[in-house]
Amino acid sequence: MGLSRGIGGVRSERRFAVRKPGPVHRSRPRVRSFGLSITGGYVYRGPSNALGITGRYIYADFDDGRIWALDLNTRTNAELANTASFISTFGVGENKELYVATYFADGAPSALYRIVKISP
């Protein structure tokens, strides 16, 4: 017999009923020019509204590195940044500012960034 690695502690003998899935209703039309692999984000509630994104849902496309702000009231999208990074996750700091983590790829190290406005 093989060595138990603790998997038995997370297995379940309980059976769940499987229902036939119903129709999927999208909240906005699918646009194929982006959105190949969406990385979910957060609604921005930080102390600074320098970017004009307070109350907007900030998310990214892992595949092409673009960061978007979705206005939940008007359901309109605005592109915030076009990076060359693979954005893997978002996080919120104690200061309620939004952070973005990138995934190691093509020799570029993984990194953590805070979203800020860059002056022209």
Image: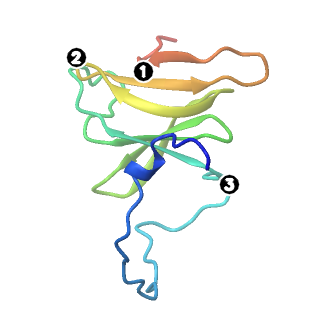
Q: Residues within 10 Å of mark 1 (few under 14, many from 20)?
A: few
Q: Please tell me whether mark 3 or mark 2 is closer to you in this view.
A: 2
Give the CA distance from mark 1 to mark 2.
Answer: 13 Å
Q: Residue at x 29, y 20 (%)?
A: 93
Residue 115 badge: 1
Question: On the rendered structure, is 17 left or right of 20?
Answer: left
Instruction: Name the residue tied to disc 2.
Output: 95
Residue kind at label 1, given as amino acid type: Ile
Q: Earlier in the sequence, mark 3 or mark 2?
A: 3
13 in relation to 19, above or below:
above
Instruction: Name the residue tied to disc 3.
Output: 33
Q: Residue 87 lies in what quarter of the image?
A: top right
Residue reaching furthest right? 106
Give the CA distance from mark 1 to mark 3.
Answer: 24 Å
Q: Residue 62 lies in what quarter of the image?
A: top right
Determine whether the residue tagged by mark 3 lies in a helix, strand or loop.
loop
Question: On the rendered structure, is 38 left or right of 9?
Answer: right
Determine whether the residue tagged by mark 1 lies in a helix, strand or loop.
loop
Residue kind at label 3, given as amino acid type: Ser
Residue kind at label 2, given as amino acid type: Asn
Q: Residue at x 73, y 25 (%)?
A: 105
Question: On the rendered structure, is 103 left or right of 67?
Answer: right
85 in relation to 18, above or below:
above
Residue contact between numbered discs 1 and 2, judged by CB atoms under 8 Å: no
Q: Residues within 10 Å of mark 3 (few under 14, many from 20)?
A: few
Residue 99 badge: none
Percent across and percent down for residue 5 are 51, 40
Q: How is the image coloured?
A: rainbow
Q: Residue at x 20, y 21 (%)?
A: 47
Determine whether the residue tagged by mark 2 lies in a helix, strand or loop.
loop
